[in-house]
Image (tube, rainbow, N blue to C red):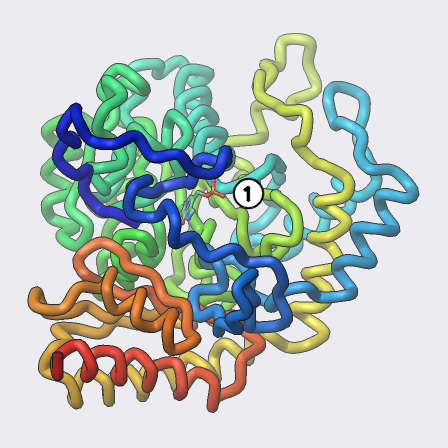
Amino acid sequence: MTMTDPVQAPTKARLLDGPALWPAQAHVPTVIGRQLIIERGEGSYVFTSDGRRLFDGTAGLWHANIGHSHPELARAAYEQMMRLETHHIFARFTNDKAHALGERLAGLAPFERAKVILNSGGSDAIDVACKLARRHWQREGRSSKKVILSREFAYHGLHAYGTSIAGLEFNREGYGTDSLVPETARVSFNDAGQVARVVDEIGAENIAAIVTEPIQGTGGVNPPVPGYLEAIQRICRENDILLILDEVITGFGRTGKMFAAERYGIQPDLLTFAKGITSGYAPLGGVLVSPRIWEPFYVDSPATPIFRHGATYAGHATASAVALAHLEILERDQLIPRVGDLERVLHRELAGLDAGHSGVIEVRSAGLLGGVTLADHLSAEAIADDLIELGFISRPLRGNTLQISPPFIISDDELVSYVQAIGHAINERERR
Ligand code: PMP
């Protein structure tokens, strides 16, 4: 991913031809002609059209938690499609798989009596959570409470709300962003005192919600500084501000707990999820909603309001069947406790990497999420390219940082080899 927009190309430059598919999040001239076409996956490895076997050290975009091409999930999708591909869940209709998934998720939620909204991914989930937060206050008769606060370096997807609340400025620029979704503001990613001051300045009577990832992902793998999330929760409670926890990366085991909310002892009002609910085998995301938010919409009265939101694929039956089968496998194969073991290996190996390489500025990790920040004379983008040549996938993130987020099914040895490969790539660059 290129982190800043390059300078405008001179107008005389040659126009590139390329494949019809516009590459996502890419500086097109940098990637055309050197795209890696992945055509097969098996467990923690993917295979390219030019014959490479690559260790998927990022689990794709933090999603392939149980690894690639799992036959049980292929079967779950096939069987569901043979019975009913999907049926929408608008008004009186629902379908049995979405219905069952709702029950299952309510049972896993980190708070009591959760309701579940389903859609197709993380960006969708963020749009829904932010809309619902504003709707909540409007319905309460406090319609001035509209501002959505998010943290610097935050990533919440790239739909309208996600773009407007992005803490990575390059994702906000170029859309007339302050009018895309008006009334948003950024707060410090690590200084809760600053957050309290911003709340005072804007006024709690104008603020709907604070949105935060428990551990920032795309912003560089930043676990919360001790006390930060707890302080944010306190600020929300004391000021009647809703807390939206974005667990699109951390949900379903990535931190060694079902949700990071449990790891950090946080009770959000709304919790967004996606990726790890199906390990990416079907596009699915959603929101866990706490009673405070949903109860007014469930009152037995003609005057009860409607939350006017929904989409054709909300509660998609095949995606839901895949999610149910996936959650069974997570539990049966004890993959979340396994993340706890791997966390210790990752922590130890990263400490070794840090101690052994002057080119490493800082390492950070929590659960099976790691970030390696490199000195200026090394480029995370270049090292990620070198790692491909060595047979390993990593990814450059903000702040010259390499991403580590392999599938949960790897062995200790595979994790050790991966971190060693990063060390090797750094050594080779420094030698040159
Ligand atoms: N929130 C977070 C924390 C994410 O990391 C992402 C995706 N990386 C999203 C939201 C958006 O999810 P999606 O790409 O599925 O729309």
Q: Give the side of residue 196 with respect to residue 15, left or right.
A: left
Amino acid carrying label 1: it is Leu
Residue of label 1: 288
> Disc 1 on helix, strand or loop?
strand
Q: Quadrant of the C terminus?
A: bottom left
Q: Residue at x 48, y 38 (%)?
A: 19
Please tell me in which quadrant of the rendered image residue 182 appears: top left
In the rendered view, would you say 345 is above or below 222? below
Task: Tell me if residue 399 can be seen.
Answer: yes
Q: Give the side of residue 104 with respect to residue 33, left or right.
A: right
Q: Give the side of residue 371 with respect to residue 69, left or right.
A: left
Task: Tell me if residue 205 can be seen.
Answer: no
| Residue 76 position in % (x across, y down) | 81, 55
| Residue 399 position in % (x across, y down) | 17, 57
Please tell me in which quadrant of the rendered image residue 16 appears: top left
The image quadrant in which ligand 1 is located? top left
Looking at the image, the residue that sits furthest to the right is 83
Q: Residue at x 42, y 40 (%)?
A: 23
Name the one closer to the observer, 141 or 190.
190
Q: Residue at x 63, y 9 (%)?
A: 303
| Residue 242 position in % (x across, y down) | 37, 36
In the rendered view, would you say 44 is above or below 135? below
In the rendered view, would you say 342 is above or below 79? below
